[in-house]
Amino acid sequence: MTTPPAKAGTKGVPRAERERQILAAATEEFGRGGYEATTVAAVAARVGVTKPLLHQYFGGKQDLYLACLEPVGERLLGAVRAAMAGDSPGAPSTPLRVMDALFHALDGQREAWFVLYDPTLPPDSDAARRAAHYRKAIDGLAATGSAGLLHTTGSDDPLDADALTYAWRGLCTALVRWWISHPDESPAAMTRRCGRLFAAARSLGAAEGERI
């Protein structure tokens, strides 16, 4: 998962390739350490370029963060949308499809989840507003899915749907964090694991419901 640092002082690297290297390193730095702790100097050192060159390519720290956020936000939002639109007879449940889509979207760059869900973004900054835009869009899809899932159980309580949406976001974050600490787990293996966890949760919920 770690992006290996390039040799310092390398010459002749095409600009597009150098930008790709910088964005990959910056995404990992922002995802691992958060916006507040990440420095442009650290990203430049990882790639083996000078800080002035990085500024020339991407501007300041916030501009670099936004350059990382945009592809991450679009990729994750697109993955969730596609998963929720893929309902068909015999298809896995919507929650499992969404998790599978997220795991595949994050494959090779798992820390990217925490670029979007970063609690250290400066309040009222362009970075915070843009991240909030993507989170709100994903939360909106999650709210729709939560309401639909609860409706199949006979619950139309909007507070139930709101609570489930909140819990779902926390579950996704926890599972991605666990996945990062288990680098040998493939997206497919994580989806199968989620299937087992969801089945266990359904069994537990059914058993608790019988006691109430």
Image: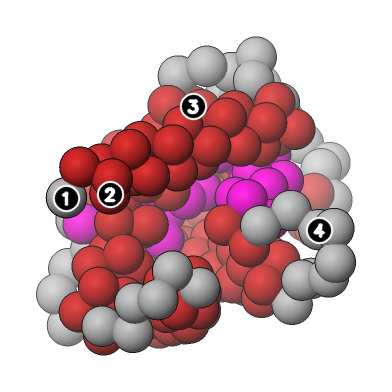
Q: Pointer 4: what residue?
A: 91
- What type of secondary structure mainly makes up the magenta span? helix
The reply to whether the C-beta atoms of the residues labelled 2 and 1 are less than 8 Å apart is yes
**Neighbours of disc 3 within 10 Å: few (<14), some (14-19), many (20+):** some
> Closest to the observer: 212 or 139?
212
**Neighbours of disc 2 within 10 Å: few (<14), some (14-19), many (20+):** few
Q: Pointer 1: what residue?
A: 212
User: How far across and how far down the image is residue 100, in percent?
Assistant: 68, 47
Q: Of callouts 4 and 1, which one flags the residue occurring earlier in the amino acid sequence?
A: 4
Q: Amino acid at mark 2?
A: Gly
Q: Of callouts 3 and 2, which one flags the residue occurring earlier in the amino acid sequence?
A: 3
Q: Secondary structure at mark 1?
A: loop
Looking at the picture, the colour scheme in use is: secondary structure
| Foreground disc of the pair 4, 3 | 4
Q: Of callouts 3 and 1, which one flags the residue occurring earlier in the amino acid sequence?
A: 3
Q: Of callouts 4 and 2, which one flags the residue occurring earlier in the amino acid sequence?
A: 4
Vertical placement of residue 18 versus 196, above or below: below
Q: Amino acid at mark 1?
A: Ile
Is 1 left or right of 116, judged from the image as shown?
A: right
Which stretch did the figure color magenta?
96-119
Q: Pointer 3: what residue?
A: 180
Q: Is residue 78 magenta?
A: no
* Image mark for residue 209: 2
Q: Of callouts 4 and 3, which one flags the residue occurring earlier in the amino acid sequence?
A: 4
Q: Residue at x 17, y 68 (%)?
A: 122
Q: Secondary structure at mark 2?
A: helix
| Foreground disc of the pair 4, 1 | 1
